[in-house]
Image: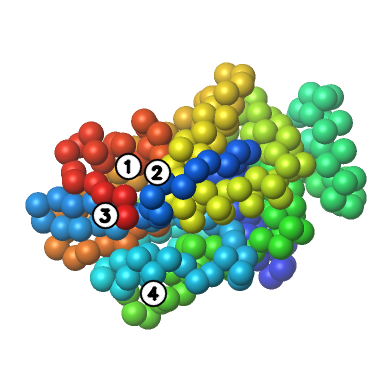
Amino acid sequence: MRIRTGGKKILVLFFILFSFIFTVCSQDAGCQNQKIFLWKVQSDDNIVYVLGSLHVMRQKDYPLNKSIEDAFGKSDVLAVEANINDITQLDLEILLEKAFYPEGETIEGHVSQDTYEAIKKETERLGLPLMLVQRQKPWFLALSLTSIELLRLGFNPGYGIDMHFISQASGKKKIIELESLQCQFNLLSGFSDDEQEAFLLYSLKELSILEQEMESMIRAWKRGDTITLESIVAKSASGDIDMSTVLEKLIHERNRNMVSKIERYLNDSKPYFVIVGAGHLVGKKGIISLLKKKGYAVEQM
């Protein structure tokens, strides 16, 4: 399968947005004493700043809180989930093979009739010919439709928190990855058929309310409102067993793996600035709670 340059950019866009599917919210909450979505984590040896990221934003959502920029300035190393500027690590030929059904197969033969009807409804609303997406597997179609809707609403990964700091760090600070684009791709493409369909159904349901949820999400993020973010994870986890297993793999298992990496940074001597999706930080199974349980001094700034 040939890959055009434009296709490469679209594929990378989908991976930038993928973890954002579970960081949208449907409710607002009160101010928490002007806290921000940044934590200072200390060990006997080092300081690690942990910032919750929104992977897509708008130009008008800047500038960021000065405390965030100051913490970044004090840090020697930037750690992100994946360096979204480096697509050379991806084998895009293999990616396409796992994102699309082979010639002669379509998604209609792999999902329930109700799910297929929901796909037709949303592609029609977006003005997207059904024939253009019929060979996409459910996990990839979920990313495709969410990405298209976010772009239509004016949200851009170019203004995402990750990209903002990767651009600032390039050539000035060391940039390392908690995971990688390839790791994230392997996770998504490795979902079972039932998990993929649950993932797609969740995404389809969210599309119609995405705009108001985005606005609420950004307000909550600016206030450091962990209560609203925790409600997002709880909302996502509610439902059938397939969706619960998706959340375990997408969020909780990754949280544990990222905490292990952060512990290594805490044993180093250089201050780190860590950026992960905001949804990974909250809740009893979130990164912040896990770090506290391990005995580190953790302070929300």
Circle 1 crowding by C-alpha within 10 Å: few under 14, some 14–19, many from 20: many
Circle 3 crowding by C-alpha within 10 Å: few under 14, some 14–19, many from 20: some
Nearest the eye: 143 or 34: 34
- Eyeballing the image, is 234 above or below 178? above
* Residue type, mark 4 in image: Ala
Q: CA distance from mark 2 to mark 1?
A: 5 Å
Residue under label 3: 40
Q: Which quarter of the image is occupied by the N terminus? A: bottom right
Nearest the eye: 231 or 13: 231
* Residue type, mark 1 in image: Ile
Along the horizontal axis of the image, is 10 left or right of 119? left
Foreground mark, 4 or 1, reads 1
Q: Which quarter of the image is occupied by the C terminus? A: bottom left
Residue under label 4: 169
Q: Earlier in the sequence, mark 4 or mark 1?
A: 4
Q: Are marks 4 and 2 in contact (CB under 8 Å)?
A: no
Along the horizontal axis of the image, is 263 left or right of 45? right
Image location (x, y in percent) of residue 68: 37, 65
Circle 2 crowding by C-alpha within 10 Å: few under 14, some 14–19, many from 20: many
